[in-house]
Image (cartoon, helix red, strand yellow):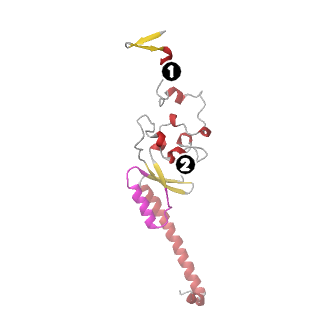
């Protein structure tokens, strides 16, 4: 049997086979508690995701030690869409900027030729699961504004000055206790 729609004949089997476009995932499927959630062992579920990883990139940066280092991080944070965070001791500059090849439906416009970093991202045997699988993202530190960082930075730089002052005092006591060794070392 054929069904006529808008003046065209289309076999019922063809209609069923056509189905929704590949990138379409019904909301009921996403919200369903019956279906088992995707398994990270089978790779990232890009077809279910809102392309979280395509909306930013993060670069590891050095931990700030000197006042100049602190000022550099403050400078990063003065820019729009930049945040700095610390996770498991590593410092990162995150730039929230959408990939130019991200399509309106959340798919990748260059999927077949995407960079290797995109291919590797989210696979459990690489760097760990993608954001889709991450339930509890926690940061050691997280800064969205230069003001928030400055507040933290002032306290850290004050601690640094105290440590340096203690070292200078120990050096001076050491020199005073052993003037011969102090002269031999050029002090």
Q: Residue furthest top?
A: 1
Q: Is residue 172 visible?
A: yes
Where residue 23 appears, as percent x and y from the top left, is 47, 31
Q: Residue at x 41, y 37 (%)?
A: 103
Tell me the SS state at disc 2: loop
Separation of marks 1 and 2 at Cα, in angstroms = 44 Å
Q: Is residue 51 visible?
A: no
Q: Residues within 10 Å of mark 1 (few under 14, many from 20)?
A: few
Which of the two residues, 157 or 136, is positioned nearer the viewer here?
A: 136
| Side of 184 where 98 appears, left or right | left
Q: Residue at x 41, y 41 (%)?
A: 101
Figure check: 16 above or below 93: above
Task: From the image, state whether disc 1 or disc 2 is nearer to you.
Answer: 1
Tell me the SS state at disc 1: helix
Which of the two residues, 145 or 54, is positioned nearer the viewer here?
A: 54
Does the magenta run of residues contain 67?
yes
Does the magenta run of residues contain 80?
yes
User: Disc number at residue 118?
Assistant: none
Where residue 91 appears, as percent x and y from the top left, is 51, 57
Q: Residue at x 49, y 65 (%)?
A: 65
Residue tagged 1: 17
Per the rendered image, the range of residues in magenta is 60-82
| Side of 98 where 137 appears, left or right | right
Figure check: 173 above or below 160: below
Which of the two residues, 3 or 58, is positioned nearer the viewer here?
A: 3
Residue tagged 2: 138
Where residue 185 appears, as percent x and y from the top left, is 56, 86
């Amino acid at each position: 049997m054929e069904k006529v729609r808008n003046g065209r004949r289309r076999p019922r089997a063809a209609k069923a086979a056509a189905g929704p476009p590949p990138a379409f995932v019904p909301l009921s499927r996403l919200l369903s508690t019956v279906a088992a959630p995707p398994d990270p062992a089978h790779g990232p579920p890009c077809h279910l995701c809102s392309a979280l990883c395509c909306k930013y990139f993060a670069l590891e940066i050095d931990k700030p030690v000197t006042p100049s280092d602190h000022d550099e991080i403050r400078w990063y944070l003065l820019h729009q869409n930049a945040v700095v965070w610390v996770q498991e001791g590593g410092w990162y500059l995150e730039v929230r900027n959408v990939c130019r090849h991200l399509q309106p439906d959340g798919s990748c416009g260059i999927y077949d030729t995407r960079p290797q970093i995109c291919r590797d991202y989210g696979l459990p045997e690489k760097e760990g699961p993608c954001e889709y699988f991450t339930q509890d993202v926690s940061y050691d530190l997280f800064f969205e504004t230069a003001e928030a960082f400055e507040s933290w930075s002032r306290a850290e730089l004050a601690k640094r000055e105290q440590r340096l002052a203690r070292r200078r005092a120990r050096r001076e006591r050491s020199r005073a206790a052993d003037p011969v060794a102090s002269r031999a070392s050029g002090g």
